Amino acid sequence: MATLTFTPSGIYCPAGDFYIDPWRPVARALITHGHADHARSGMGAYLATDIAAPVMRHRLGEIPLETISYGETRQIGGATVSFHPAGHVPGSAQIRVEVAGEVWVASGDYKVVDDGLSTPFEPVQCHHFITESTFGLPVFRWQDQRNIAADINDWWSSCATAGKTAFLGCYALGKAQRLLTLLNPDIGPILTHTAIENTNSVMRAQGITLPHTTQAGPDIVPKDHPGALVLAPPSALDSAWARKFGQRETGFASGWMALRGIRRRRSGDRGFVISDHADWTGLLDAIKQTGAENIYVTHGYTDIFARYLTEVGFNAQVVATQFGGDEAEDAA
């Protein structure tokens, strides 16, 4: 029997009797990171990295959660398990599972660029590699994040000069905190939607350094914060709360901004191409560094990406999962 199998409840390890990022309630779940499509409620027991644990508890409540450090080895039944940096968001991990000398790695979501916030991605040698393909098309090739930071700060500065508030739509876990590290606070105050500030508070409490922000709650007085940039989930950008700020411009920070059609549908003023997932080159580099011959492609441009991998010599196949990706179009 294979070390890992694909079941209706998720990725399963028979030798250890556990699942990785299951989408149905199971007795024991190993979790790659805290995004909602990977960390779900209802599990009998959870195992995640010590860095991911605080956000998971914030999201899921008082769950039965054990923690593990990067590189630490844990024996679970007949399986040897370890967690390794995925570079996606703080605490995200690839999960290495070895049974009788056969090694699998379930990567969850990952990016190979060091963003200065998450523990950088580390390739893990294996025989079988389970990879995402959220941005598995050649059109997706990310710029240096320093250039993106300059573009965002220039836009914010121009908004402030024009007497407008800059609203930047982003995912509340990972993307928002990464953007905070790229913003120039000399331009003006940085305000955050409550959902984002709650996550910021959890991360600060565990020792992750973030710039100063002010929570923009329902009682915020916009005129007291001239020249501000507001970080908010995309769903809040056209709300009554946002309209309180009067004249404003709206931007979106997402890998999907690389596609013109999606930029147009967003109806925002600006789109900034920045993602916490690997681009086309990053995916290929990560796969090559594992040394794996067998590649299992999940969520994203699965058919196209798997076909390409097969053409260049890998044994690649598509595996259906219920991972949606935190950068699904409706989540920016």
Image (spheres, rainbow, N blue to C red):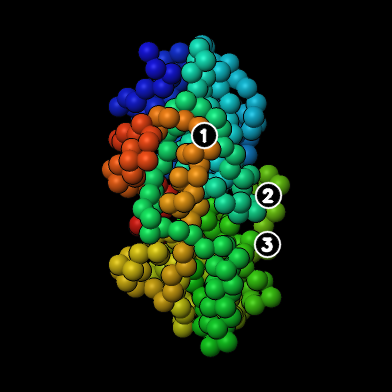
- Label 3 sits on a secondary structure element that is loop
Disc 1 vs disc 3: which is toward the camera? 1
Q: Amino acid at mark 1?
A: Thr
Residue at point 49%, 49% (across, down): 282
Q: Is residue 79 in view from this perspective? A: no
Q: Position of residue 168 (x, y in %)?
A: 49, 68
Left or right of 307 on screen, residue 141: right
Q: Residues within 10 Å of mark 3 (few under 14, many from 20)?
A: some
Which quarter of the figure has residue 214?
A: bottom right
Which three-letter amino acid code belongs to the residue tagged 3? Pro
Whole-percent x and y of residue 200?
Answer: 60, 54
Mark 1 vs 3: CB contact within 8 A:
no
Q: Which amino acid type is shown beneath numbered disc 2?
A: Ile
* Residue underneath mark 3: 211
Q: Nearer the viewer, residue 113 or 200?
A: 113
Q: Residue at x 36, y 53 (%)?
A: 137
Which mark, by number, is residue 208?
2
Within the image, what quadrant is residue 42 found in? top left
Q: Earlier in the sequence, mark 1 or mark 2?
A: 2
Q: In the visual, does 201 lie left or right of 295? A: right
Examine the rendering and report whether any part of residue 245 can be seen.
yes
| Quadrant location, the N terminus | top left
Distance from the alpha carbon under mark 1 to that under mark 2:
29 Å
In the picture provided, is 6 more to the left or to the right than 67? left
Instruction: Measuring from the top left, give residue 182's x and y in whole percent.
Output: 62, 64
Q: Quarter of the image for the C terminus: give it.
A: bottom left
Q: How many marks?
A: 3
Q: Which residue is mark 1?
A: 290
Residues under labels 3 and 2: Cα distance?
Answer: 10 Å
Disc 1, SS: helix
Q: Earlier in the sequence, mark 1 or mark 3?
A: 3
**Discs 3, 2 touching: Cβ within 8 Å:** no
